[in-house]
Image (cartoon, grey):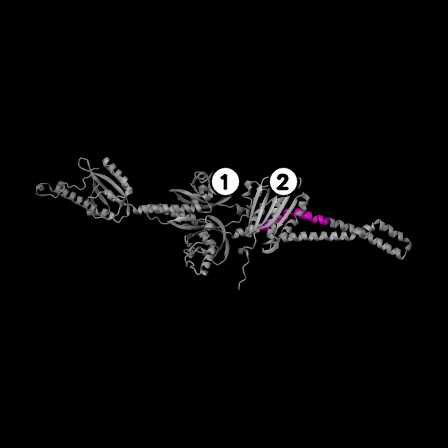
Amino acid sequence: MASTFGKTDPSRSTPTGDHRERDDGAATAGLSQQEEARRCQWMLEHGPQPFASTDLDRRILHVNDAFCKLVGYTREELTGTSILDLTAPGSLEETRRSHERALAEEGAAESILKQYRHKDGRLIPVELLLEAARDDDGRPVGLFGFVTDVSQRMRAKEALVESERRVRAIFEGIHDAVLVQDQAGTILDANPAAARLLGYELSELIGMSAERIDEGSDLRDWLKRQPLEGRTSRETTFRTKRGDSIPVEITSSNIQFDSRKAVLATVRDISERIALERTRRRFAEVQMKSAQTLEAKNRALSQSEERYRRLTEGSLDAIVVTDGGGRIILFNPAAEAVFGREAREVIGATLDLLIPSLFQQQGEVRARAADAGGSDGGDACVLPINVASILNRTVELTGRRRDGAEFPIELSFGSVEANGRIEYVASIRDQTERQRMRAMLAHTDKLASIGLLSAGVAHEINNPLSYVGNNLAVLQRDVKGLLEMLIEADNVSKAHPDEFRKFEEISEEIDWPYIRANLEPMIDRTLEGVRRVANIVQKLRGLARTSRPKWERVGFDEILENALEMMRGRLRRDGIELIVRNEDVPFIQCVPNDITQVLLNLLINALQAIEAANPDGGGRLEIRARSKDPWIEIAISDNGQGIAADDLARLFDPFFTTKPVGEGTGLGLAISHGIITGHGGRIEVESRLDEGTTFRILLPRHQPEETRPAPPSA
């Protein structure tokens, strides 16, 4: 398109006397065209659209008011200067190329994004629609362009990128597995938790059909119902990459993903819940309020924020987000249910309102600083010094509800960067129900241990009872003969002295010398057998006691003897060598029944491993106790069949066992691990196939502070 911008056409000037012979219609048309041209010229000069024209040397010929306002210069300052002087250095090369393209092809308009430098030095992003100005012969005489300020658009784009980064951080840091699927069941996106749950790489999951991992027969029906019902919940079984089956609960909702309809599925492994008598947790689903769309350029930003809200408010875990100073900036509905507080109560408060144990170390540091006469930091909240020890980890702490009641929680603590500032994301689960179930499992395992030992206990009781019965039978027989002899002797001595020989015959028949020599020892052994039976029964009753755990200072040898009491007969019968080495551990502080149960579980496992490796008898079982500051170490070693390396990582998982079906519950080691952890210690294991296994129990020398009973109130 040829342009004659800036030129004057004499034929379009105001009519003079030389033209009065023209008819009135032509004069009226000429006036209308001139009026229209003046109106267009005025709009171009004073309208809101920035405009500029240059010659072929890129010197500015003309600019309008809007262009002057955009760059901060006057017309006089701009006229005659090079347009490249206003162009930011980063946009110079693209500007030159766009000029060349516009001049090379007639009628071609160029649209580019570039930056102008304002008079005050700041850079202004603009979109430029550029075209060549040509003379009547079509030769280029310069350039003209319309300029649009796109600063607001660029800021919206940057905000969109930042929002999507925050959503991705939450998406990848959430504790539950999350899958995004299209309506055909193809996986469009997944978070790292889903990859860990299923054993796949993220690249393997994306693009995979849900039928490869979802073993439920209702998958197709669910995919059809989901778009209509909106929010659904179902239980099914997922198949991992290794071929294992995992029972899961899926909560799903409809979302927009990359401008198409999709399903957001939050997946939770419910293996433990099914194992613990299918105890269900109910959760409240909160209806999301959709934000109003502000403008077309901000629609993507609104969708991103909506996705972020769905991930947090629809989560089954309590999610609390704080700024770098520990002040709460997000508190989702699940957190309201867990802590019994509404979001408006806690927004702006510090995290120690909910988790005081997280700030204990910081409080101790401030107290020491105050005692030394230094500054305590004022009222500013600073995250505790040991935050690095829990960052990107899952730990167990104590939370506080609105009524002041404390309860156990599981905390997954991570950090994200938002707008150049650090924010902390805490994913929290209430552990009250889990700890209650742990206590139930401990009692169940105790009963299971008693059942497993019933055969040995019966054997131990039967041995003393057998000779008690035999001795009593012999005693009954001999006492009867003794009475006959004594009666006869009495009769002979009084009435028939001459028949005294009858007394001698009876004495010889009942072996009176043997009775006289063995009657008293026989009675002693009988009493010893009865005492032994009573002792075994008493220890069995102590093992099954369910009273509140009480820490005591007890002798280690006494605890070990209680654990070994019901196994000695089986050890002797199988010919297993028992070695006990106590290297200066006279006493330990613990809950005696719990530690006895742990030792008993480990000794039973060692005994069974030895029997499996030595079906003809023999083997060695060694128990060693020693002081290893700040711990007391108890090691139980056997030369049994050992444990496979692949099984060591799962050894303390509930319901995992390497024993044949019917010979183990899979609870013993899990409960033992919980008991030792509850004592503030740890349990370790080393094993090699066909060589044997060593379990090491490390207990603190002194009772941990958190396990000591609270002092009585005033």
Disc nearer the start of the sequence (2/1): 1
* Tag nearer the camera, 2 or 1: 2
Report the residue that reaches farthest toward the bottom. Answer: 714
**Magenta region, main secondary structure:** helix
| Residue 448 seen | no
Please state which of residues 513 and 409 is positioned toward the viewer in this rendering.
513
**Residue 561, percent from left and from top:** 64, 51
Residue drawn 37% across the image and 47% down it: 162
Residue drawn 54% across the image and 44% down it: 650
Q: In the rendered structure, are the residues bearing label 2 and label 1 in contact, judged by CB atoms less than 8 Å apart?
A: no
Q: Which residue is mark 2?
A: 613
Q: Which residue is mark 1?
A: 240
**Residue 362, percent from left and from top:** 46, 56
Please state which of residues 401 and 540 is positioned toward the viewer in this rendering.
540
Structural crowding at the residue carrying mark 2, measured as other residues with C-alpha within 10 Å and reported as few (<14), some (14–19) or many (≥20): some
Q: Is residue 178 left or right of residue 120?
A: right
Dividing the picture into quadrants, the one containing residue 164 is: top left
**Callout 2 amino acid:** Ala
Tell me the magenta residue range.
442-466
- Look at the image and tell me in which quarter the N terminus lies: top left
Dividing the picture into quadrants, the one containing residue 86 is: top left
- Is residue 457 part of the magenta span, yes or no? yes
Which numbered tag is attached to residue 163? none
**Callout 1 amino acid:** Thr
Structural crowding at the residue carrying mark 1, measured as other residues with C-alpha within 10 Å and reported as few (<14), some (14–19) or many (≥20): some
Report the residue that reaches farthest toward the right. Answer: 498
Looking at the picture, does residue 195 appear above or below residue 373? above
